[in-house]
Amino acid sequence: MAILANPGSSETPAHRLVIIEGIMGSGKSTTMRFIAQSLQASGQLALPLHERTEPHPLRATDELEHWFEPWRDATPQHLADRALTKWAAFVEATQSGSPIPVTDGQLFHGDLTHLLLMDAEPALIFDYVSALAAIIVPLNPFVLYLWQEDVEKALRTVCTERGPEWIDYQVNWKLAGPYCVRKGYRGLEGLISLYRDYRRITDDLFDELPLAKLAIENSRGDWPAYEGQILNALQLPVRP
């Protein structure tokens, strides 16, 4: 897996967008807040965008009648086109000197997850991310990818932390998608299988991103070390 694609020289334009990616429970939201606070501490305005932000400026399912089950209202191509339109408008607005958005997912975690659940063809998914990457280039984005070597262990850990109601919520929602129905995924084991598939796709997508990026395997939970790597990659001062 590619680790860092950006020499971070003093001549590199400042990042006007930061995206944090990873599976459920990988630390995206916490890291989003850390990066936003670090940008603010360095004198730069930052706008943290949690995945639960309502309305969300990037989430293409928001206006669908069945936003929770977009396969009932849209084709994968329709959803991909809606998402790219949202991203294009977002980039145009962000170029005008607004705070630096720090997003919890939305490159992979978000509409791409829906595309997978909708059983989109792999070529459509890869073309979608390629087009999205081209749209956001003017912002010189930085993509942080939090990953875990053992997907099953990572998911079982977050499921234990969040409890049976959360597990039922995830299973009942995601395993109802056409992709999981076709695969015959059921229960917690099915959810684990889904996220193994998801990780294989996002690993490949991340490796191909022609953007500044950093991948951190964070299974050890050594957040002071990870935060140091992140600050170094973003050329921000280390916070005491």
Image (cartoon, rainbow, N blue to C red):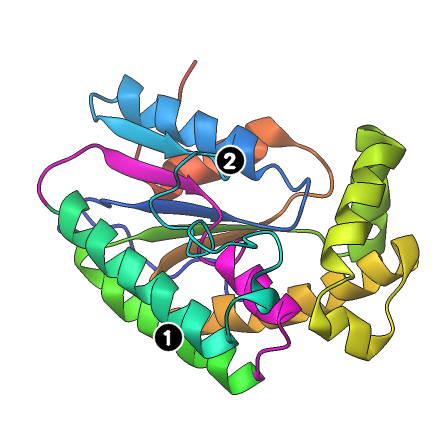
Q: Residue 130 carries which label?
A: 1
Q: How far apart are marks 1 and 2 (CA)?
A: 25 Å
Q: Is residue 124 visible?
A: yes
Where 144 falls versus 119 (above or below)?
above
In the rendered picture of this protein, how many numbered marks are placed on residues?
2
State the quadrant of the N terminus.
bottom right
Q: Which mark is residue 233?
A: none
Is 25 or 125 nearer to us in this picture?
A: 125
Q: In which quarter of the image is residue 42?
A: top left
Crowd band around label 1 with a 10 angstrom C-alpha radius: few (<14), some (14–19), many (20+)? some
> x%, y% of residue 233?
37, 44
Identify residue type, mark 1: Ser
- The residue that mark 2 highlights is 52
Q: In this view, does 227 lie to the left or right of 151?
A: left
The part of the chain drawn in magenta is 96-121
Contact (Cβ within 8 Å) of mark 1 with mark 2: no
Under tag 2, what secondary structure? loop
